Image (cartoon, rainbow, N blue to C red):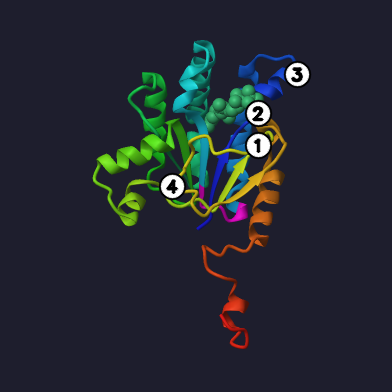
Amino acid sequence: MLHVAIIMDGNGRWARDRGLPRLAGHREGARAVRRVLEAAPGLGITDLTVYAFSSDNWKRPPAEVSGLMRLLRQFLDGEADRCIANGVRVSAIGRRDRLPGFALESLERAERLTRGLSRVHLRIALDYSSRDAIAAAARAGADSREGFERKLIPDVDLLIRTAGEQRLSDFLLWECAYAEFWFTERKWPDFDGGDLAAAVSDFHRRQRRFGAIPEPLAERRDIPA
Ligand code: FPP
């Protein structure tokens, strides 16, 4: 299993650099999601989680919020067949009760149509706040590490954030406990399969220790502890 999570940043700056409205950047960003989804299986990625709309994004101007919701519907409706053909399961994490009806409808349809598929699991974080997700898990009875693991999503292996920002912004706080981080200056609409391959290849060169010490050192009996 390889779980890659992406904070897709820089859509607005990409558009501004070209004298375009912010929504043009988001539209191009949706194309980048499709590119990444296509590249994922070839890179051994089994789980891909993308941060499409945070609970704090409701603070954006209403026109941008509704544009993002429409884009989401277009993406879900337009990609459903391709997801089915490629074995991609689609689901969402986050609150559903504040989503507009048309977006929720498309989401539930995509979830229903792709439920049995397992080559790649695409999770779209929508109206998502990790702190709220953790609090909800606790309210639902989680009171141990295993309890939280059951109510949250699988641990992230590799966290990617684009456009030069280096923060988590309330994304998968629990699940990123041992994630490797990879940052790039590239703005999300320009991100492609080659960038994803570079991130995954860098990830495979890292030594993950999970708090232990490297194997060869652990085996050396001549060096006192
Ligand atoms: C951050 O860039 C991006 C978002 C808040 C929205 C991400 C949405 C998409 C990529 C498109 C829709 C998603 C799917 C799954 C189809 P920003 O607007 O904060 O950019 P800026 O920091 O340059 O202003």
**Ligand 1 within 8 angstroms of badge 4 C-beta:** no
Q: Earlier in the sequence, mark 2 or mark 3?
A: 2
Q: Which residue position holds label 1?
A: 162
Q: Earlier in the sequence, mark 1 or mark 4?
A: 1
Q: Judge by depth and name the residue closer to the eye, 88 or 19.
A: 19
Q: Is residue 149 visible?
A: yes
- Determine which of the numbered discs, if any, sits on residue 18 in the image: 3
**Ligand 1 within 8 angstroms of badge 1 C-beta:** no
Decide whether residue 45 is among the magenta residues.
Answer: yes
The answer to whether the residues at label 2 and label 1 have Cβ atoms under 8 Å apart is: yes
**Ligand 1 within 8 angstroms of badge 3 C-beta:** no
Label 1 Cα neighbours within 10 Å, binned few <14 / some 14-19 / many ≥20: many
Residue sticking out furthest to the right? 18
Distance from the alpha carbon under mark 2 to that under mark 3: 13 Å
Amino acid tagged 1 = Thr
- The residue depicted at 46 percent of the width and 43 percent of the height is 173
Element type at mark 2:
loop
Magenta region: 42-47
Q: Which residue position holds label 2?
A: 10
The answer to whether the residues at label 1 and label 4 have Cβ atoms under 8 Å apart is: no
The answer to whether the residues at label 3 and label 1 have Cβ atoms under 8 Å apart is: no
Ligand 1 position by quadrant: top right
Distance from the alpha carbon under mark 2 to that under mark 1: 7 Å
Q: Earlier in the sequence, mark 4 or mark 2?
A: 2
Residue 101 image-quadrant placement: top left
